[in-house]
Image (cartoon, rainbow, N blue to C red):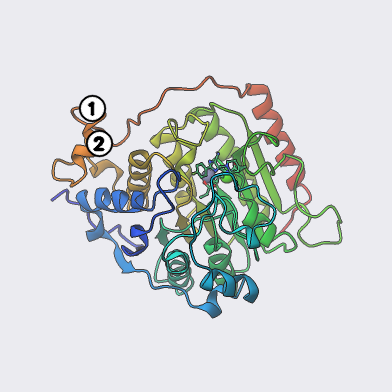
Amino acid sequence: EYGIVRPKGYNVTFHTNPEMEKHHFGQTHPMKPWRLTLSKSLIMSYGMPFAMDNYIARAANFEELNNYHTQDYLDYLGTVLPEPVPRDVESANPDLKFNLGGSDCPLFEGLYDYCSMSAGGSLDAARKVCNREADIAISWGGGLHHAKKAEASGFCYINDIVLAILQLLRCYPRVLYIDIDVHHGDGVEEAFFSTDRVMTCSFHKYDPCNFFPGTGALEDNGPKNEMNAGAHHAVNVPLNDGITDDQYAWLFDSVIGKIVETFRPSAIALQCGADSLAGDRLGRFNLQVQGHGQCVAYCKKLGLPMILFGGGGYTPRNVARAWSWETAISLQCEDKIDKTIPEHTPWREHFRQEELLPSLEQILGEARPNKNPQKRIQEIVQHVHEQLRFVQH
Ligand code: V1S
Ligand code: CA
Ligand code: ZN
């Protein structure tokens, strides 16, 4: 009824699993898988599923997870049972096996299923892009960028992005990974540290002592040894609290534009963590739905095959707004979208807690003071340009 039609000349695939959304990390934990239900219901209310191919993500099997993660880690992840964490045993407990069971990466009912469904969605997305059945494939249940080969970290247990990029590398010579989550994409950077076939670029809040995970300085650009193929192939954009849409868009275009010119990627993997939006429970930036979506729009214009992943995002209504808007951008139906949240959304009442006529673009949240001087933003771009002089493909 919104007249949203399939975009001409290209295809979008959408990968979700309603079972995944039913899992709970625990009452006080910021990661709420039902934000995926909220997002999908808003996307459906706009009629967007009519314009794309929708798939129920299958669970990835052991062998697929084992393409990156170690057998030991997966065996443990598959067998360990939830037990109540004593209040005083905090997540920084060094005795935790594979960092599982603390407050950041708790053990909960169905954990292994949750992880394999998240990875399954992203693997399905990668295969669609590989087979040229999708120009853009969307996996909002993925984007878990902190997980390591044999360690859980920051709400992430299985690195679905690494698994998906490994798939892309079977059919594309070079993949560009971009990460707009407010946190550093350390797990993905680490996985591809020693190859020149993947360039990673993360934009994040950086404060080594006070903000998770504490890595991702401007000067961390991959292996220091020039003989290592991965040298210069990690780009880091460390930022401060309160960055605005305009500054972010300028940075994003300057940095990604230069990377595309020098690295010449054949496919893009874009992690769209929505915790970089203003008003996020954990984030510190001032991005609006518009500014966040601008990054997706910029990448889409490059005309390269692309996967969109989810990631962080701790104010569920804002997550749903951003990912709905970015699904619309993928479908090129931004102009057909009514900016007032549709009347018949099952969640309309939920959004109405904010305003009588809740809007898709207008997110709640106080603006934070912007602690990013323009001079510093320019220095960052300068550094990245100098770094990329070493990269020629
Ligand atoms: N920031 C933050 C934060 N908040 C929590 C947290 C809060 C309540 C809980 F019940 C459980 C955890 N943990 C953190 C961070 C991890 C952030 C992960 C972001 C993930 C992503 O968005 O990038 C991708 C999905 N952890 C820490 O800061 C570590 C601690 C050092 C401090 C907080 N305590 C709870 C654990 C140890
Ligand atoms: Ca990031
Ligand atoms: Zn995050």
Q: Where is residue 325 in the image (x, y as percent from the top left)?
A: 34, 44
* Residue at screen point 41% across, 62% down: 137
Q: Name the residue under label 1.
A: 355
Tell me which image quadrant ligand 2 sits in.
Answer: top right
* Residue at screen point 63% across, 21% down: 373
* Residue at screen point 30% across, 66% down: 53
Q: In which quarter of the image is residue 196?
A: bottom right
Task: Report the front residue among 337 and 271.
Answer: 271
The answer to whether the residue labelled 1 contacts the one labelled 2, judged by CB atoms less than 8 Å apart, is yes
Give the answer, above or below, for where 311 lies relative to 10.
above
Q: Name the residue under label 2.
A: 351
Q: Badge 1, how many Cα within 10 Å: few under 14, some, many 20+?
A: few
Task: Report the front residue among 188 and 382.
Answer: 188
Q: Is residue 17 left or right of residue 99?
A: left
Residue kind at label 2, given as amino acid type: Phe
Residue kind at label 1, given as amino acid type: Glu
Element at badge 1?
loop
Alpha carbon distance from label 1 to label 2: 7 Å
Q: Name the mark on residue 42.
A: none
Instruction: Report if the beta carbon of the residue with label 1 is closer than 8 angstroms to ligand 3.
Output: no
Element at badge 2?
helix
